[in-house]
Amino acid sequence: METKYSKKHLLSLYEIMYKMRRFEEEVFEFYKKGMMPGLAHLYLGEEAVATGVCAALKEDDYIGSTHRGHGHLVARGADLGKMMAEILGKATGYSKGKGGSMHIMAMDKGILGANGIVGGEIPIATGAAYSAKYRMTDQIAVSFFGDSATNEGTFHESINMAAAWNLPIIYVIENNLYGISVDIRDVTNTANLADRALGYGIPGVVVDGMDVLAVQKAAEEAAERARSGNGPTLIECKTYRWQGHHVGDPAVYRERKDSNEKASWMERCPVACFRDQILSMKITEKEVAKIEDAVEAEVQAAVKFAEESPYPDPAEAYTDLFSDL
């Protein structure tokens, strides 16, 4: 298969996706052992989306994330140890253990925060895009959200504003078909959510969210459009979450309609399929295995760091409530 991307770049994409997968598998283990407070909303199965989109960004760009945001942070190069510590509620975490899985933020990586409110980060990312335009930088913002967020008022208000003001932002729908247990196809009378872009006079693009190179190509075109002053783009990535809404959700609702649905999507595992793809591009099994070994060591170091880190001092409960960031 021919591609414009270098061997180094292809390997870096695989490294990021594999890191997401292994990191979340460890999070799942922590949850099953009762070691983490709150819930875990895993990104398993959606790795190609965050990887492809973030590959099109510069270091000082912004992203807004969701409750299913571990993958977004990994794609932006967040520290795995600080992420894992935050998930376990430890003082060494990104938010000193006060945010947990759903509220990790890392301003040094342009990560404006994961968000537990459906559609809640869309106006925040739009505000970051407005800031970039006001300050006349070439920064752009990316807003990640799920299919159900497209039925929220924040989605429509934010895109309308961004389109009217030509803000430098990319709106990325991670259409994994379900909002908690609600099938988006039962509550939305359109085959492609990206078609909603027409109502705001901006491009709407549908892309295979299981194909990291296809996602990156769409994101690169949208980023170029944003940096050139031509405003936002709405990208819909067709993907699938392997787990339920959270790890305690058996997701029986999707089995009622189609017992083969999950299996058919898992056959298109974005990590495994991309591994096969790059092995057909003169990349060797040895080179891939070397990356996997390095990722495994990094993930295990993150697990050890988090396990051995202390919990926050109760006296810290009322600190860091406000910030000038």
Image (cartoon, rainbow, N blue to C red):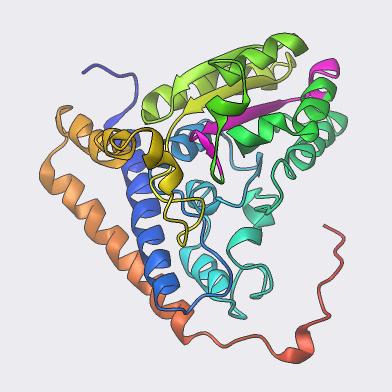
Q: Which residues are magenta?
A: 162-179
- 170 within the magenta span: yes
Up/down of 291 relative to 231, above or below: below
Residue 141 visible at all: no
**x, y (%) of residue 165?**
85, 19
- When asked about the image quadrant of residue 275, the answer is top left
Task: Look at 51% across and 75% down and name the residue there.
Answer: 36
**x, y (%) of residue 303?**
40, 74
162 or 242: which is nearer to us?
A: 242
202 or 137: which is nearer to us?
A: 202
Up/down of 268 relative to 316, above or below: above
Farthest residue, direction left = 285
295 or 171: which is nearer to us?
A: 171
Task: Look at 75% across and 30% down and name the residue there.
Answer: 155
Up/down of 156 relative to 131, above or below: above
**x, y (%) of residue 30?**
42, 73
Task: Look at 39% across and 79% down and name the residue there.
Answer: 304
Which image quarter is the C terminus in? bottom right
- 112 within the magenta span: no
Residue 265 horizontal side relative to residue 244, left or right: left
Which image quarter is the N terminus in? top left
**x, y (%) of residue 237?**
49, 27
Residue 112 visible at all: yes
- When asked about the image quadrant of residue 166, the answer is top right
Farthest residue, direction front = 256
Up/down of 207 relative to 317, above or below: above
Residue 66 horizontal side relative to residue 18, left or right: right
